[in-house]
């Protein structure tokens, strides 16, 4: 059992592991101590001087972020001198901060705004002109820096030194002329740069992708698991349910990722928006003419085709590893166990380097559920082992191929070329989100699918840990389905019409 200490926090006895700071203890007890520079994923800097607390018996206020809790200590966060220190610290942070809240993307989730409402000095005593500094600096692929907004909390500098270990940012000049910036002739190049936007408490760093697109108070965020690779980062997806539009993905603290996520994972909302999705089902009639139909009509047409052949020899499944464990179970239970389908192939990107790892989070396996698919194959008595079996589909002799496509086209550079080759087969039913498949006039049959943010289920990451999808957004595509829902509809049709 680890050694503990007990101290008083605002009159309440609190017991924490030895070495815990007052800031950490206060967070556990839901006691709010204002702060800017402290972050749970970074080292302590103690530069904002905002988290002042009173320790009984000591002559001066102390910073909670660097104050270890000790037995018998009596800490108060709400004394008059502590409150006064908070007001004055905030006043100095605001002295050169521009009043551009109406156009700032950080508005609505800004530490300065929040703290000004709770501890601000509403009658400022600062009369000197503001120091003007460079604005709209291009410092990275997705980053814009406004040094006037910066309060020099140094979170970004510590992130570059401690997390990415690139040391790409520094503090230059002195006093109220000091600014954050990159070194001359350099930019931030790594795959984690948008984390700087997340940890900046005042909107000095903004994302090109999100700038001026939406006010955050109009957005809803729902927890999910990132589908961009096999790490399985915990994330929050932000969208507007009333317009069924997605705007961003941000990291949520989790076992797999800590506080961070990569930039590629942040792009996983793009394929969910209507402008790039398959928005209708279609099928091909007896005369070879393709026509749009309802999702129910497309499923019924597929069910009829399956009933007209011997599934064991004439039906094949081509499956990407980007769907949930629950979807794989329902898929294999029906097709393999009930129908006796034996031709099941894994669909993988031929150029992927599955064993690559950047040392932080991003993995070369760009499928969220490779492990889950392998488990499902084994449980169904099918050959497992990670392999690309795409080329085997054309040689298997199946009359009907059900192609459950990769959900995220950007992770499959070869997708359009592979889809083109599939359209040469006798009959392929695409279960897909990809709008490009609807644009391919040679495709004979397709059913629009739900994305990862629109369904419930679990992914199993590379380490065997489950990541959940628990709070779905409404699907932007009318009557879009997940794999399990399509399987249920096929099964119901089969039961109502009898089996061959």
Image: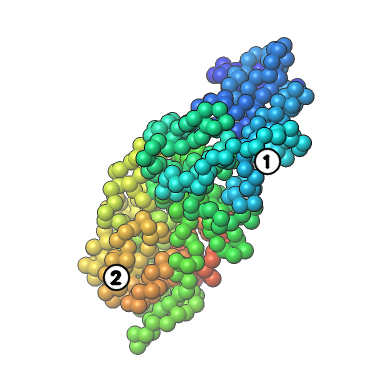
**Local crowd at mark 2 within 10 Å, few (<14), some, or many (≥20)?**
some
Relative horizontal placement of residue 319, taking residue 127 as reference (left or right): left
- Residue 315 on image: x %, y %: 32, 69
Depth-wise, is mark 1 or mark 2 nearer the camera?
1
Vertical order, 103 against 149 (above or below): below
Relative horizontal placement of residue 318, taking residue 65 as reference (left or right): left
* Residue designated by label 2: 420
Q: Quadrant of the C terminus?
A: bottom left
Q: Please, what secondary structure does the residue beneath circle 1 have?
A: helix
**Local crowd at mark 1 within 10 Å, few (<14), some, or many (≥20)?**
some
Q: Is residue 252 visible?
A: no
Q: Residue at x 40, y 36 (%)?
A: 183
Q: Nearer the viewer, residue 302 or 17?
A: 17
Q: Residue at x 27, y 61 (%)?
A: 390
- Residue 94 on image: x %, y %: 65, 36
- Residue 65 on image: x %, y %: 59, 25
Residue found at the very far front of the displayed protein: 129
- Residue 177 on image: x %, y %: 54, 32
* Label ID, residue 114: 1
Identify the image quadrant of residue 407. Answer: bottom left
Identify the image quadrant of residue 66. Answer: top right
User: How many badges with numbers are in the image?
Assistant: 2
Q: Is residue 268 visible?
A: yes
Mark nearer the N terminus (1 vs 2):
1
Q: Residue at x 35, y 74 (%)?
A: 440
Vertical order, 310 against 412 (above or below): below
Q: Quadrant of the N terminus?
A: top right
Q: Please, what secondary structure does the residue beneath circle 2 have?
A: helix
* Label ID, residue 103: none
Vertical order, 295 against 357 (above or below): below
In 3D space, how far apart are the residues under numbered discs 1 and 2 (Cα atoms)? 53 Å
């Amino acid at each position: 059992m680890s050694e503990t200490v007990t101290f008083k926090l605002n009159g309440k006895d609190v017991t924490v592991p030895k070495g815990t700071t007052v800031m950490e203890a206060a967070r556990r007890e839901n006691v709010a101590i204002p702060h800017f520079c402290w972050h749970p994923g970074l080292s302590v800097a103690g530069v904002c001087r905002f988290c002042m607390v009173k320790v009984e018996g000591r002559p001066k206020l102390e910073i909670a972020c660097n104050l270890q809790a000790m037995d018998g200590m009596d800490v108060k966060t709400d004394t008059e001198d502590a409150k006064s220190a908070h007001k004055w610290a905030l006043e100095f942070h605001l002295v050169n901060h521009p009043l551009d809240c109406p156009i700032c993307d950080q508005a609505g989730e800004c530490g300065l705004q929040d703290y000004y409402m709770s501890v601000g000095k509403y009658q400022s005593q600062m009369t000197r002109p503001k120091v003007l500094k460079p604005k709209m600096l291009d410092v990275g692929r997705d980053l814009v820096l406004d040094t006037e907004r910066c309060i020099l909390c140094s979170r970004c500098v510590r992130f570059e030194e401690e997390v990415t270990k690139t040391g790409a940012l520094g503090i230059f000049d002195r006093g109220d002329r000091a600014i954050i910036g990159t070194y001359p002739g350099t930019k931030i190049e790594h795959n984690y740069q948008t984390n700087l936007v997340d940890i900046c408490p005042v909107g000095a760093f903004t994302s090109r992708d999100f700038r001026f697109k939406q006010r955050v108070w109009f957005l809803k965020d729902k927890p999910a698991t990132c589908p961009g690779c096999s790490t399985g980062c915990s994330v929050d997806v932000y969208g507007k349910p009333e317009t069924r539009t997605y705007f961003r993905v941000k990291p949520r603290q989790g076992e797999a990722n800590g506080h961070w996520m990569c930039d590629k994972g942040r792009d996983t909302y793009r394929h969910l928006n209507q402008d790039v999705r398959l928005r209708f089902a279609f099928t091909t009639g007896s005369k070879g003419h393709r026509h749009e139909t309802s999702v129910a009509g497309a499923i019924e047409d597929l069910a009829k085709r399956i009933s007209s052949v011997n599934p064991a020899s004439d039906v094949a499944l081509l499956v990407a590893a980007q769907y949930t464990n629950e979807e794989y179970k329902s898929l294999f239970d029906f097709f393999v166990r009930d129908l006796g389908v034996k031709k099941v192939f894994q669909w993988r990107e031929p150029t992927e380097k599955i064993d690559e790892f950047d040392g932080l989070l991003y993995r070369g396996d760009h499928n969220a559920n490779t492990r889950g698919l392998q488990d499902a194959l084994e449980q169904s008595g099918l050959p497992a082992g990670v392999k690309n079996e795409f080329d085997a589909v054309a040689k298997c002799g199946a009359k009907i191929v059900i192609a459950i496509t990769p959900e995220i086209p950007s992770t499959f550079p070869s997708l359009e070329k592979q889809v083109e080759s599939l359209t040469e087969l006798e009959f392929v039913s695409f279960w897909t989100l990809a709008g490009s498949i609807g644009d391919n006039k040679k495709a004979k049959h397709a059913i629009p699918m739900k994305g990862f943010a629109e369904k419930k289920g679990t992914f199993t990451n590379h380490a065997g840990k489950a990541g959940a999808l628990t709070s779905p957004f409404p699907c932007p595509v009318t009557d879009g389905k997940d794999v399990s829902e399509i399987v249920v509809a096929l099964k119901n049709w089969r039961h109502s019409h009898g089996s061959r």
